[in-house]
């Protein structure tokens, strides 16, 4: 079954600095990959979704992710961090016979003033 | 209008009690889910229903029983609560796509604390 691995449970950046959150998928090329964001005390919401074809995916709030088959990666980036970006970020992939999204363990983004 | 709403948001209860969490979605979706998020933020699927029929039932104690009276509602009933049941429970919904490109819409979560 497909799975994703998120490297780094916590990432700390200064406001205005580049944000890079890492996600690697397990094996065969998945038809879809997702990034979700969870703000404090809230549910998850979709940031962006990869579908076969477009390797650079743009999402909400200035985030984007690049699908790299050679590296089995789907890392999330943002050129300039804002304090409001502080949240938990989850990478996800459809898995199993019913293609229910399976989530990575999450990366907590901390933004310092 | 809240797309996926769940109640209660906070629930503190004693071990051994029975409790329910209700969930409703107004998005017209076919599929609904219950996820459990532990204290380390790990998110795990518990159940999935499609048009009131159970399609996913992960390894969850049978003290947990989902009920879907119609496709807009998926409630979670928990019997004989244990300390380890303390977590955040998320209801979610999506349109059903057989290839898995579903965007999942989450509720705000129900914080369950068992004392």
Image: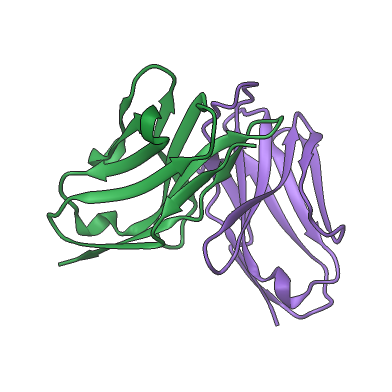
Chain colours: A green, B purple
Is A107 positioned to the left or the right of B27 in the image? Answer: left
**In the image, farthest residue toward the left:** A16
Q: Nearer the viewer, residue A97 or A111?
A: A97
Which sits in the foreground, A72 or A34?
A72
Residue B24, image x and y in percent? Answer: 65, 43
Q: Residue at x 76, y 80 (%)?
A: B14
Percent coordinates x, y for residue B6 in the rendering: 62, 52
Residue at image x 44%, y 19%? A52
> In the displayed structure, would residue A56 be above or below residue B2?
above
Q: Quadrant of residue B86?
A: bottom right
Q: Which of the 4 image quadrants contains residue A7?
A: bottom left
User: Is residue B13 shown to the viewer in this render?
Assistant: yes
Q: What residue appears at the point 63 percent right and 35 percent down from the top-left corner?
A: A95
Which quadrant of the rendered structure holds the C terminus of chain A?
bottom left
Residue B103 x %, y %? 51, 32
Q: Against A28, is A9 above or below?
A: below
């Amino acid at each position: 079954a497909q799975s994703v691995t998120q490297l780094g449970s916590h990432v700390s950046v200064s406001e205005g600095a580049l944000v890079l959150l890492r996600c690697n998928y397990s094996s065969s090329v998945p038809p879809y990959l997702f990034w979700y964001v969870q703000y404090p005390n809230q549910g998850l919401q979709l940031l962006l979704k990869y579908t076969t074809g477009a390797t650079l995916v743009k999402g909400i709030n200035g985030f984007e992710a690049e699908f790299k088959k050679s590296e089995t990666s789907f890392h999330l980036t943002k050129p300039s961090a804002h304090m409001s970006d502080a949240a938990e970020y989850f990478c996800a992939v459809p898995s199993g016979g019913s293609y229910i999204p399976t989530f990575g363990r999450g990366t907590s983004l901390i933004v310092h003033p | 209008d809240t797309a996926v709403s769940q109640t209660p948001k906070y629930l503190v209860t004693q071990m051994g009690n029975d409790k329910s969490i209700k969930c409703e979605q107004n998005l017209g979706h076919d599929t609904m889910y219950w996820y459990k998020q532990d204290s380390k933020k790990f998110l795990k699927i518990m159940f999935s229903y499609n048009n009131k029929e159970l399609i996913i039932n992960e390894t969850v104690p049978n003290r947990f029983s989902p009920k879907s009276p119609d496709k807009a509602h998926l409630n979670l009933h928990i019997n004989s609560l244990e300390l380890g049941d303390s977590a955040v429970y998320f209801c979610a919904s999506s349109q059903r796509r057989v290839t898995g490109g579903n965007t999942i819409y989450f509720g705000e979560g129900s914080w369950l604390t068992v004392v």
